[in-house]
Amino acid sequence: MSTDSPSRENIHEMFDTISPTYDRVNRVITLGMDQMWRRKFRKFMPTGKSRLLDLATGTGDQILALVDLVDEAIGLDLAEDMLRIGQEKCRQYGDKVKMVCGSALKVPFEDQCFDVITMSFGIRNVTNPEIAFQEMVRVLKPGSRALILEGAMVKNSWIKPFHLFYLRKILPRLGGLFSGHKSAYNYLNQTIETFPCGQTFCDLMLKNGFKQAECHNYTFGSVRLYVGYT
Ligand SMILES: C[S@@+](CC[C@H](N)C(=O)[O-])C[C@H]1O[C@@H](n2cnc3c(N)ncnc32)[C@H](O)[C@@H]1O
């Protein structure tokens, strides 16, 4: 498959194409900070026995950052090659971690069966985020939460031009250099610039069934962690 101008409909095919280098490129383009951001979820995790669903799990890094806090974790993604890598990385946890091929827009699980849902750098890639929110609310138990991590534009007007320069000029080149697919990383930065963030994002969560939503900013707001309560 060509990675030129990927649309959200076939975005998982683009991720399959870049799967062999996905983790390495993530470390490079975030200067290793992606793993630190993933660990930010820890303080919002439920205590006690819990079952986690990680939507758009990709190669499973979000599960690996939380697996010691849960009894069971399921990763869901449409990209089979990404999932295969994730499965291999989680092999040491045996039956505690499962990888399932499926869509965040039609979650293949019954109502109210998860204690927590996570989704890192995934919501921006689905064709309809509002349906993803509705699916989260459907499969979460009442009184539980979804934790959604996503890239955004920084707020500070002094830093913003540097951030834009990085997103438009540096990130696609670095991504292209390390993955061989520059257009994939062009697409990724364009979606950061245009995707709803902050209160707009929280309002969308509320409109689609969450009872409460909050936003936590990291690294000048270039990454946001949204917590939605059911
Ligand atoms: C940027 S990657 C994030 C992977 C992983 N969560 C991480 O933090 O590295 C986005 C992932 O979203 C997946 N994806 C896109 N649309 C999806 C959908 N409708 N349902 C499930 N996964 C989807 C892609 O296949 C890809 O693996």
Image: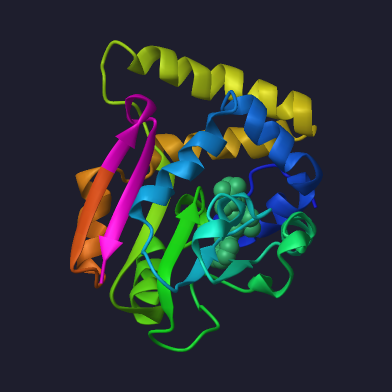
Dominant SS in magenta: strand
Give the camera-side residue of 156 and 90.
90
The relative height of residue 154 versus residue 34 in the rendered view (above or below) is above
> Looking at the rendering, which quadrant does residue 115 occupy?
bottom left
**Outermost residue, front side:** 48
The quadrant of the rendering that contains the C terminus is bottom left
Of the pair 141 and 15, the residue shown nearer to us? 141
Q: Is residue 12 left or right of residue 214?
A: right
**Could one spot residue 7 in this view of the protein?**
no
Q: Position of residue 119 (x, y in %)?
A: 48, 57
Q: Residue 134: tell me if it is visible.
A: yes
Look at 50% across and 78% down and name the residue there: 106
Instruction: Name the spot of residue 111 as percent of width and height, x first.
Output: 40, 87
Judge by depth and name the residue closer to the eye, 179 or 73: 73
Name the residue: 22% across, 57% down.
213
The answer to whether residue 130 is magenta is no
In terms of depth relative to the viewer, which is nearer, 199 or 50? 50
| Residue at the far bottom in the pictured view | 110
At x 78% / y 59%, what residue is drawn?
81
Give the residues in magenta.
216-230
| Display colour scheme | rainbow
Q: Name the image quarter holding residue 206.
A: bottom left
Residue 60 position in % (x across, y down): 65, 55
- Image side of residue 207 versus residue 182, left or right: left
Q: Position of residue 84 (x, y in %)?
A: 79, 61
